[in-house]
Amino acid sequence: MTIAKVVVTPTYRVARVTQQGKQVVRVSRLGARGPAGTNHPIQLSLSIVGRPQGAPNNVLARYSPPQDATVEAALMRGYAETPPDVSSTIKMVRVSDGAEVFRAVWGVGENEPTFTVTITTILATERYRFEGDASVDASVADLDLTACFTRVE
Amino acid sequence: MAVIEVYRNADENVLVELFSDLEETTPIDLTDAVVTVLRGDITPTVSILDAVNGQIELVFPDTMTADLRKNRTYRFTLNVHFNLSGDDRPLPEMEVFVR
């Protein structure tokens, strides 16, 4: 078996930047979907952790999918490390420009809320470039945003 | 030599595709193969992503890149072992540059 050529491609990258008080996670992925005709959706998970700075607290998470991706499912889950659970207060809002916006509101006395935004996308092309931004605009400090891609079989 | 750029504190994945021709038309069949890090000063997690299409995925988790130093180069070498033939095929050394 002779290996004549080795092709190396960065497949995803997560960069964090702060823009005008917002924290932005910029995610990109370049790679192959797999054999032609197969369907391997890519699941993008965003985790947002924030410490309440005032009350009421409000987190707005926004995800802008690439133009050639179809958002198949979007879900936001949240919980607080200390009760009461804030899950029931989390709302997901879809806006008309195609972006996914998630809004979470929690009350006085609740701290360390953790949110997970899970977005499953279908990518249109066999070899693709995937770029999307997620940002959080909130009255919270010490926000930490992370993102990762998971291949869904 | 392939140079991989990674960002410190970031999750990074890298796709490695193996071909038996320079035109990239015939992928190496990795169905019976095992890919490991042969040597190096960094050890990404290696898995076969798509055996029939010669695709290998390298994962550099943020827990690993957090320990790397910016503007430094790390090196590693992958080995492909084919179980049926018993052949070992070390790949060219790869460099990881940390942004």
Image (cartoon, coloured by chain):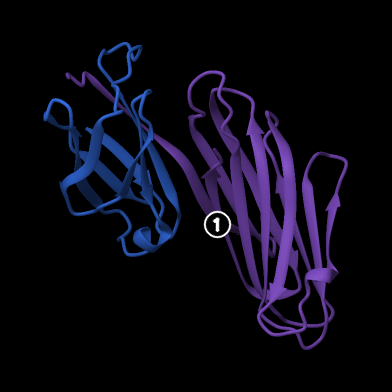
- At 65% from the left and 47% from the top, the residue drawn is A133
Secondary structure under badge 1? strand
Q: Chain of mark 1?
A: A
Drawn side of residue A19 relative to residue B17, left or right: right
Query: Residue reaching furthest front?
Result: B84
- At 30% from the left and 50% from the top, the residue drawn is B44
Tell me which amino acid carries mark 1. Arg
Q: Residues within 10 Å of mark 1 (few under 14, many from 20)?
A: some
| Relative height, residue A141 to residue A115 (above, below) | below
Q: Quadrant of residue B33?
A: top left
- Chain B is shown in which shade? blue
Residue A31 location (% of width, % of height):
47, 31
Q: Quadrant of residue B62?
A: bottom left
Drawn side of residue A10 relative to residue A20, left or right: left
Residue A139 or residue B90, whichever sits in front:
B90
Q: Residue under circle 1? A: A16
Is the N terminus of chain A in the top left, top right, bottom left or bottom right quadrant? Answer: top left
| Relative height, residue B35 to residue B27 (above, below) | below
- At 26% from the left and 54% from the top, the residue drawn is B72
